[in-house]
Image: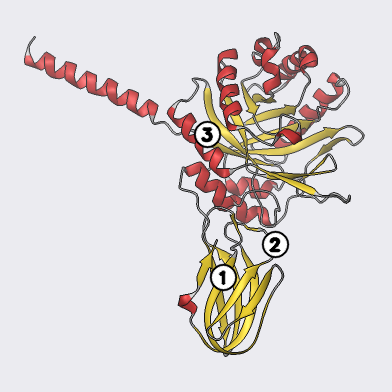
Amino acid sequence: MPSSHLRAAFVLLLLLLSGCEQEAQAPLDQQLYIWQRQWRPAHAEALADSRADFSTLRVLAAQAHPGAGWSRIQVDRELLAADGRPLVAVVRLDGQLPDLDLQRTRADILALVDHWRVQGIVMQGLEIDHDCASARLLGYRDFLRDLRRALPADLRLSITALPAWLDSPVLADLLRQVDASVLQVHAVSAPENGLFDPARAQAWAKRWNDASDRPFLLALPAYGIALVNGRVESESPLAIAGPRRELQADPQQLAELLANLRRDRPEHLTGVIWFRLPLPGDRRAWRLSTLQAVARGEPLHADIRPDIQQSGPLHEFALANLGNLDGPLPERIELPARSCDAADALAGYRLERAADRLVFTRLNEGRLAAGQQRALGWARCEHLDQGGSRVYP
């Protein structure tokens, strides 16, 4: 073979290998749900801080619940327009609803789409979130078929889907009615069984991939709940007494799942959607720094250390978590100090004073969220070595 032909064949081989390598290294798309029913000023900062890591926003736009009926969410259209990311409007139809009034529900959804467009909100797609019982999937398929025909042709239709549907003979035909599906792999079992199981999530994703050739995403948890007398408590406290059993999605488990998906991604899986965008003050959602670290594949760690503020002889002590992961409160903190005429610990710790140090001992177990602080105590001391503190887990 002439040398020119050999060179051409070599270049073609390099291009083919390069194309395979690029395909293998294509990043897993990561999106966010915005699920707050009341928009607040805090959304502006949260959206700005999340923009670099999450490509698309899926925004709760309307919901229908038994007894409450249909209601629209008053989203901040100016804020969404300024953010500029692609938007998917999500309509939540509660799974406990009686048989859907197909004609009325379809009319409500079409009116919502028109309302968003009149308001100048540019929608890329519409997602229907309906925890439909497997026995009712045939009727749900017909509903989606008719809705697809009525929607604007340029609007992509997707649905939230449940692993329980995998055994239904209707599933393949149902998925043909939509452009994509979002497989929910959290909070799909009885709460007593836990919030999320990474091994089951990966197994479900592989089975879902085999069920249809349509693209799909995984809905992943970045939050926690509490169980109180058999009821679920999220961000809003339940007005009932009783012990609370906290269930939290483990960031390390989710990080490992993402790593596995990047190494061995099902063919039709295009990305993941995190539930949900956290706001400052959320009690059970991950902090945004934790969510971003998991999404980026960064190492997770808590870094809890004393923070000391001085004003003359007065020293005020706090604990600060400078890491990207929640961590347990330290069992003991020692601060080298001399000539202290007064000192005290605040709630959760006990103070012991020695001639050359202050010792704070934990009374109750607790956790400190990433990026957060909590007060520890205070002291009036002539000498305090701020760099000599020791923290015992």
> Please, what secondary structure does the residue beneath circle 1 have?
strand
Structural distance between the alpha carbons of marks 2 and 1: 14 Å
Q: Quadrant of the C terminus?
A: bottom right
Q: Residues within 10 Å of mark 1 (few under 14, many from 20)?
A: many
Instruction: Say above or below: 198 vs 165.
Output: below
Closer to the observer: label 3 or label 2?
A: 2
Q: Is residue 155 visible?
A: no
Q: Which mark is residue 54?
A: none
Q: Is residue 392 visible?
A: yes
**Circle 1: residue type:** Ile
Q: Residue at horizontal 62%, vertical 32%?
A: 197
> Please, what secondary structure does the residue beneath circle 2 have?
loop
The answer to whether the residues at label 3 and label 2 have Cβ atoms under 8 Å apart is no
Task: Mark 2 or mark 1: name the one nearer the start of the chain.
Answer: 1
Q: Quadrant of the N terminus?
A: top left
Task: Mark 3 or mark 2: name the one nearer the start of the chain.
Answer: 3
> Please, what secondary structure does the residue beneath circle 3 have?
helix
Q: Which mark is residue 333?
A: 1
**Circle 3: residue type:** Leu
Q: Residue at horizontal 53%, vertical 54%?
A: 324
Q: Which mark is residue 364?
A: 2
Q: Residue at horizontal 77%, vertical 11%?
A: 138
